[in-house]
Amino acid sequence: MAEERRITLGMKACIKCKYLVEDKEIICPNCGNNTFTKNWSGVIILYKPEQSALAQMLNLKKPGKYAIKVKGVV
Ligand SMILES: [Zn+2]
């Protein structure tokens, strides 16, 4: 878990698709949403969504980092 935190320090999660972006980003590059939360936990790092059963299950199409849990909409 400490390792995950180090990788994703200062990142925020899109509340819609859970895509993780740097704090400075305004628009989610995955779904175009502009609402993010810092209240997230766990991370999935996805390289080849088309080859990942987990990605298919979660309907993740874009390579990148995703939060596993995103809490609360403000
Ligand atoms: Zn998104």
Image (cartoon, rainbow, N blue to C red):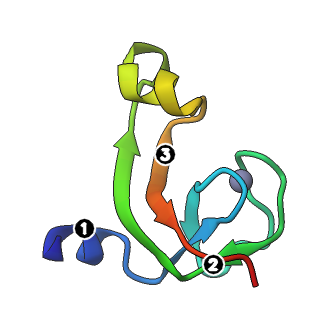
Give the residue number, with chain letter if any, for mark 1: 4
Q: Does 26 appear above or below 17?
A: below
Q: Does 59 appear above or below 28?
A: above
Secondary structure of the residue carrying tag 3 is strand
Secondary structure of the residue carrying tag 1 is helix
Secondary structure of the residue carrying tag 2 is strand
Which numbered disc covers residue 64? Answer: 3
Q: Quadrant of residue 51?
A: top left
Which numbered disc covers residue 12? Answer: none
Give the residue number, with chain letter if any, for mark 2: 37
Mark pair 3, 2: CA separation: 17 Å
Q: Nearer the viewer, residue 39 or 34?
A: 39
Q: Is residue 59 left or right of residue 50?
A: right
Q: Which one is in front in this view, the residue at disc 1 or the one at disc 2? A: 2
Instruction: Work out which residue is located at the far left of the displayed protein and give it.
Output: 2
Q: Quadrant of residue 8?
A: bottom left
N-term mark: 3 or 2: 2
Q: Amino acid at mark 2?
A: Thr
In the picture, the quarter occupied by the N terminus is bottom left
In the picture, the quarter occupied by the C terminus is bottom right
